[in-house]
């Protein structure tokens, strides 16, 4: 059942990218603001409890609905799992968004591509076009975990509610960042890093398996362990697997191939994960 739900969801992601327009979690933003506006007592611990209530109340509802679907048979359970998994991925299709950026860049429109790279290139950009391309390559390697693999990991381990937890946790962090004095921001940041830690290491190993293993694995050993280094281990493992050297200073010819290589490596990692899940099902470790 788990494997079938994942295969259906990945198929929907691949062939029906129009779903990005409807995958809207605005209700969670409204719920967050409602809870915040009705918080009568201020304080660090009160803010932390309020944030946990905001995050876990919808998840408890999803978990209860999932149990009802399980009682209704395999078809309601499957359809419900697919719906929740589709909502949990994203917020946008990774490949589709990056292809839009590369479409602009291949025509020499760097600024237009940057505008389409919402969620990728929001920090201060380096000087030099090739360094901006490298920043996008690194973003693909990191975002693949947050948008896809972390959700799949917790979905397989604990069910649909756990997969949705990843997405809602990241969304709650974005909402709280708008209020720099939010006392619960640090707690939610640490929760998101903890949720991303196991899948980040598995994805890094996947990059090594589908790329240059020795170069990638050597970098994994250098950055593994601390959950604060999730982005580093993904970035360095992926760059090692593609065998990319640091970008030299100077205005050389812009090469977009490394971004395509990163996207292809993410796709091959998806195949590895599905194959391993199928083996686990055959061995009886999951259903």
Image (tube, rainbow, N blue to C red):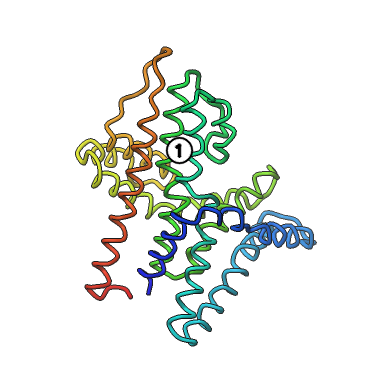
Residue at image position (59%, 67%) is 56
Question: From the viewer's perspective, is residue 151 above or below residue 213?
Answer: below
Question: From the viewer's perspective, is residue 236 above or below residue 128?
Answer: below
Image x and y of residue 275, in percent:
26, 61
Instruction: Name the quadrant containing residue 7.
Output: bottom left
Q: Name the residue under label 1.
A: 139
Callout 1: SS: helix
Few, some or many residues within 10 Å of mark 1 (<14, 14–19, 20+): many
Image x and y of residue 153, in percent:
39, 60
Please state if 140 lies on the left or on the right of 169 as rendered: left
Q: In which quarter of the image is the C terminus?
A: bottom left
Residue at image position (55%, 54%) is 18
Q: Quadrant of the N terminus?
A: bottom left
Please state if 169 lies on the left or on the right of 177 as rendered: left
Residue at image position (23%, 35%) is 215
Image x and y of residue 271, in percent:
30, 55
Question: From the viewer's perspective, is residue 8 above or below residue 73?
Answer: above
User: In this orientation, which residue lies closer to the viewer: 199 or 185?
Assistant: 199
């Amino acid at each position: 059942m788990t494997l079938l739900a994942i295969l259906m969801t990945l198929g929907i992601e691949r062939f029906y990218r129009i779903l990005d327009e409807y995958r809207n979690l605005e209700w969670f933003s409204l719920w967050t603001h409602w809870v915040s506006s009705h918080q009568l007592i201020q304080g660090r611990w009160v803010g932390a409890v309020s944030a946990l209530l905001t995050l876990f109340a919808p998840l408890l509802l999803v978990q209860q609905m999932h149990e009802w679907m399980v009682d209704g048979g395999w078809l309601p359970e499957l359809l419900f799992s697919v719906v929740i998994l589709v909502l949990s991925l994203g917020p946008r299709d990774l490949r589709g968004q990056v292809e839009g950026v590369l479409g602009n860049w291949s025509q020499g429109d760097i600024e237009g591509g940057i505008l389409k790279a919402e969620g990728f290139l929001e920090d201060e950009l380096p000087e030099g076009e090739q360094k901006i391309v490298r920043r996008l390559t690194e973003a693909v390697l990191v975002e693949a975990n947050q948008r896809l693999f972390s959700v799949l990991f917790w979905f397989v381990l604990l069910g649909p509610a756990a997969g949705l937890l990843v997405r809602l946790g990241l969304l709650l962090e974005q909402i709280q960042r708008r209020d720099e004095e939010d006392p619960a921001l640090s707690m939610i940041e640490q929760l998101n890093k903890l949720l991303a830690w196991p899948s980040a290491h598995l994805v890094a190993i996947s990059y090594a398996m589908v790329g240059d293993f020795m170069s990638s694995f050597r970098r994994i050993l250098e950055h593994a362990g601390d959950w604060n280094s999730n982005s580093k281990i993904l970035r360095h493992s992926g760059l090692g697997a593609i065998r990319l050297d640091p970008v030299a200073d100077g205005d050389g010819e812009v090469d977009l191939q490394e971004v395509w290589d990163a996207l292809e490596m993410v796709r091959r990692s998806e195949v590895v994960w599905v194959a391993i899940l199928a083996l686990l099902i055959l061995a009886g470790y999951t259903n």
